[in-house]
Amino acid sequence: MLIFKLSIMKKFFTYIIISGGLILGTACEKMLETDLQGADLTEEEALQSKQDVLDLLQSCYDVTANVYNGRVQYLNELLADNLADPTINEDLSEVYNHNTLFFNGTIGGIYQDPYITVFRANRVIEVIEDFDFSAAEKNEIAAQAYFLRALSHWELVKLFCQPYGYTADNSHDGLIYKTSTVESIVARESVASNYANIIADFEAALPNLVQNSDYYASQDAANAYLAKIYFQQGDYAKAVQHADAVINTGRYSLGNSLDRFELDTVNVSEAIFTTTSNSTLRDFRSTGFTDNYRSDLDGADPLFKANKDFYDIYAADTADRRIKNFFEVIGEDADAVVLVKKFNQEFFDVPVLHLTDLKLLRAEALALSGGDLSVAIQDINDVRLRAYGSNANDLAAGAGVSEVRDAARYERRIEMFGEGDRIQQLKRRGAIGGEAIEIRNNPWDCNGMIIQFPISEQTAAFDLNPTGGC
Amino acid sequence: MLIFSLSFWGLQAQVIEGTIYDKGGLPLPGASVVVVGQQGVGTSADFDGKYTITGVKPGSIVLEFSFIGFDNKRIELDLKAGEKKTVNATLSESASQLEEIVVVGYGVQRRRDMTGNVVKLDAKKLNDMPTPSFETAIQGKAAGVQIVTGSGLAGSASVVRIRGITSIGAGGDPLYIVDGAQLNQDFFSRGNSGGMNQNPLAFLNPDDIASVEILKDAAATAIYGSRGANGVILITTKRGSKGGLKFNFSTTQGVSTPTTMPQMLNSDQYLQLYREAWINDGNTGTPTLPRSVSWEDAQNTNTDWVDEVVRTGYKAFYDFSVSKGTDKFNYYAGLSYDENRSYIEGDQYNRLSGRFNGDYRISDKLSLSMSTGLTRSTYNRVDNAWTGGLGSAMSTALPIYPVKWDRYNIRNGDTLNRPGDWWLQAGVGNNPVAQRELKEWRMTDLRSINNAKISYSPFKNFSILGSASLDYFQSMEDIYNPAGPNTTNVDNSTAGRGIADRFPQRSYNYNGFLTGSYDWQVNDNSKFNFMLGTEYQENFTRTYSMTVRDSLGNITGTRNFVQDAPGPFYNHAELRNDYEFDSVQTSFISRFMSFFGRVNYAYKGKYLAQAVLRSDGSSRFGPDNRFGYFPSVSLGWIISDEDWMKNNRVINYLKLKGSIGWIGNANLTNIEFAARYRRDAQAYDGRDILYPLNNPNPDLRWETTRVFDFGLEYGLLEDRITGEIAYYRKNTTDVLLNVTLPRVSGFGNFYDNVGALLNEGVEFQIKSRNLVGEFRWTTDFNIAYNHNEIESLGGYSADAVGGGTNDTRTVVGEPVGTNFLVRFSHVDPATGRPVYLDIDGNPTFNWDPADRVAVGSVLPDAVGGITNTFGYKQWDLSVLFVFTIGSDIYDSSSKRQLGRVDDWNRTLGTFDRWRQPGDEAEYARLTLDEANLGSNTPWINTDQWLHDGSFLRLRNLTLSYRLNNDQAKAMGLKGAQISFIGTNLLTFTTFPGLDPEIARDFENATDRNMSVNITYLTPPQERTYSVRLNVNF
């Protein structure tokens, strides 16, 4: 009887042990794999075809368009001396006052978006080998990813780090340059290292990109970026070399329109790389501009207005058509406010890279590097012809180096108003040119001249920028 | 016929009567007595402990006395035909730590044999006061268990913490199990809408509960493996006890008020101070008031918004139950209705619940049992806290705003408002009366917890138990906002008559286990018990929407609203018939598969040992970390059983016990280990995009807590004094953090096992029968000290984990929920500006968040309670004080109520402000410009709003009178008792805000872990006065 009982018990316990073993083993492990919530897909489900990889790449452009929708431009602009104080917006007022705090929510968003692009671009690079692309396709996709990764870091390093040349060896704190999707706590790299990485990515992308494209990565766009980067580094010869690579294709012309912010940049002949809005889908990627600058709506009191001091520099030249096209003064004397008309459209494509930029860049670079001044003068005069509608204001053919340099800077400031260019030029002049530049009474290299990181960045390894403003 | 005759003859003849006492001489109302072997012959004692049994067959009989919490006792006697005998019985409390049966995981144990730390609370301790939900009645009664009652809102969730908090990013609440069924306990099923988290535990009728066991240490909780680290609360509902048919009816009727009433400025005061700020800022002329209210209109208006939203609450509770038990079967059936109208106008939680528990012994070997409860609740909701109601009355509803228009409001010739229309110029959130009256909002929930068990014992000492449970939760949220004139939605071009929202939800929680256990008596000295088991659990939620199609019939999306609706869904059958919620979305499905075993060993009944191992597999973690193993070992030594202690005159019971174990926490509410992607059609440049939603963490795994526990149970002076002292140390590693990722990652948040936490504490509990006899006095005291410290955050910063909007932080070396704030020093007498301290402690006028330091913690150093029970004849008086020592409260609302002057009303404390040079004031000079406060942020978090949250509270005072046997008999009853109950009658605290017991609405699990004791317009607790009547028949 006892044996019988024990055998029942043994059977029972054996059953439990076996079922336990099944659970612990792999047989039942499938039971523990459950579906994701709602329409979410696992990566395995999401990335099944070559088109899926292309769609993932497309999402990088989607985010990049949000970065360039006016936000990254106006943050740059706020640090400089082209805009008036946007007093009613506390976050942006901090930027204007050269004293951003790490709880600035607007900054947090703008800092994150380029890194979203970077994560996705890195993921594309990581998974591409798993798909049946031809070698050429693979190279082109990877090239686009490098291009997107590079431009994302480039926009951030300009805003959040002191400029190239701030220290002799550029060992000062830069960004984390992300080249993989692995999450880890690491220290900031040097600005020297950041620039080297950005250049390396663009250089790596160059040979495999298409020659030109309206909204996507191309050789022309990569060259234009490289021209700007070398220019910022003070390597004017290389800047000219890459600017030439674009300008000399003859694919781009300045056109007649003063305002390159048009509904559809396909018709803007000087656009090298733009982000696009879609009117049919009402997908507008220009809201950073339109929400904050538009002055043509009923009762509009836009957040951003031009700085009166800036306006006054140009206003005396009544022949300059840009003044009337871009600005409108309301009120008088001390109450005078300079509204901006440049972005008065419901939406538009945003020209990120364009010929005006490259021509003025080349002109200044040639002047600063002892290059061919006739080319520089022609570049400036091309821009002036469009601005004045005649050659009456042309720079004389025999203009000297400083005259050419100053003319290029003068044109550059008004041409690229609102595009976030001015601050970088001032910093370059301070850091590379050794000029004692002050921006609204603050030295170009004071703490508040770069934006504070969001508090989320602070880790045991990552130091925030120094606090305390200028 | 013969049987009938015998019965009849018997009924007429023999009678046994007597009184059942405890060892202290207290009568034991409700104790049972049955005649063994004579089925159906028995009764239960009345409120004086007296019983009378008729119909006893004469002869040699055995009486068995029993009562919950006491050891059974048998008395043999001879009863002659026609004889009437008096048999008094004295029962020993099992709580004397010897024989009490305690429910533990997957079984029961004698307390004497236990090596773990378990607190048992019986029904008497849980029903002694009216509470919106049973768990709040535990407060102050169990050492090491911190209960923070939800706000004054009827359905708000409380926070329960056992021995501190062992998690940061995962749920920190204990596991709740009702009669073997694991509960769904989603505190965020409706988010924090309306400024509240709805209480997922409120469905349970407290009168149905027989006992609650709280499992605290690893010896007790390791059997629950990956879900045991926060402690386990086992709830056992009532079952029929042996004896005849018993009926019980009880009712409680009560009223309630807030424990503290907010004191806000009236219109004159507001205008006076507003003008002062205006002038301080250098302005002249008539100040521009918020929302363009004219100065004249403001002067002519004085609305007391607090008065408009607060009422006298009313509570009505009815419970009726019937039970019966025999050797073969027993059952308990109960029906209850609870109507809980809080002191907040419009806030009412009604609960109708039914329960049937039954057991049937098919044979000596086989028995079946079932427990089922069904609850239907309707909760009429109003916005509160930061969303409206009393919250508005304390903030955005200014006394200069009227409730209604008293004149025509005409603009451009159009009559926009008529007299009597709601005044909505400042928005509906600023008129809490209009908000309440216009919006119809109701939660209708159905909850059913079911468990069936089958027990089979093929031979002595071996039994098999199979259990299957279902926790089904159906929840319907309905909101109706009317449109048209005199509503918040004047433009009714699309809304029509109004918008009816409906959000249906169903949750399913299946759970089944199978265990086998074997008692092996090796010899007289050695005894083993083996238990092995396996378990499966599955849990998911479905939400329902209406499919939206275009004119071609293609699906274009889903929605949960109907435009041009005549009213809410629950009032309109046509809406319910016309609209089908045909789109189903299933949330995160969670599965657990487990295997566990336990071995107990006792040598000579005084040397005890236990080993437990559980293995859990969970779908919540990735393939590499899918399984976790959770062992514990424990030892016990009943020292008082040693020969050298046996004759000790003072110490009659002494047990030393210790355990170590590793237990887990897997309380995640989504799949966080896997990469999740989403696809958007035509997203950029008209092309589709596919993009990742998270940064996957394939290494994600359980939090593991190593628990070391050391305890001493004692009984002195023949158990006149009993209690327990315990020390524990809990080291949690792999703490799950919902890290606010460095943005460099490309994502906002990320779950990672990077933290380490320590909880270390001491618990002390003593129960003393100070006086026994006619005048009785018992004192029950407990206090628990806990030290909580974050030992590591894996390199992330203090700001990487934020408690929602509540400004608590995680700082290494500090507790979870550290107040990390800029220090406020004083108000500068010369300028009236606030002076802060920078990071080095130097005074500065500038507020800079870089100067934040750890200045406090919301976690208490110690919590506890003291209950004194007095009895004299038929009167009983019970007084419970609870206390919290050393916690800080951050009054987040006062940064606006006492900070920069703006469109919030202010509290009366604001009068202590700087006015002129030389003033030494509590608060800075009034200003409308934050620059004068040294900041470019309008509302500044500083430790000026941080206060000591220690308090002592008279939580419960109950005075009862019970009828004696004769009185009851005269009324045809077995017994009756009437009680007068007051809760939260007195509070002693230095906290200058409203109520020092705060569980505000939380945003997520992290917030719930970190932000207890943060108040942001949180309604204060309720004070109630009630009468309870309990009748047995």
Image (tube, rainbow, N blue to C red):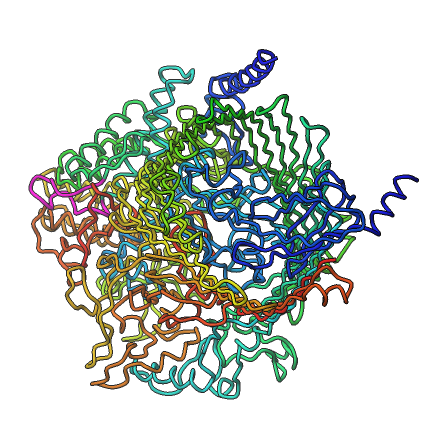
Residue B554, percent from left and from top = 67, 37
- Decide which of A384, B492 is in the foreground and name it: B492
Judge whether residue A163 is colored magenta.
yes
Judge whether residue B838 is colored magenta.
no
Residue B841 placement: quadrant: bottom left
Q: Vertically, is A227 above or below B353?
A: above
- Decide which of B370, B757 is in the foreground and name it: B370
Residue at point 16% right, 54% down?
A: A447
Main SS class of the magenta portion in the image: loop
Q: Vertically, is B290 above or below B500?
A: below
Residue B249, percent from left and from top = 71, 59
Residue B3 placement: quadrant: top right
- Decide which of B530, B243 is in the foreground and name it: B243
Quarter occupied by the C terminus of chain A? bottom left
Q: Vertically, is A185 above or below B812?
A: above
Quarter occupied by the N terminus of chain A? top right
Q: How many marks?
A: 0
- Decide which of B284, A230 is in the foreground and name it: B284
Residue at point 47% right, 57% down?
A: B139
Residue A317, percent from left and from top = 24, 62
Residue B347, percent from left and from top = 60, 65
Can residue B131 be seen in the rendering of this structure?
yes
Residue B71 placement: quadrant: top right
User: Which segment did they paint magenta?
Assistant: A158-175
Can residue B550 be seen in the rendering of this structure?
no
Left or right of B1015? Residue A184 is: left
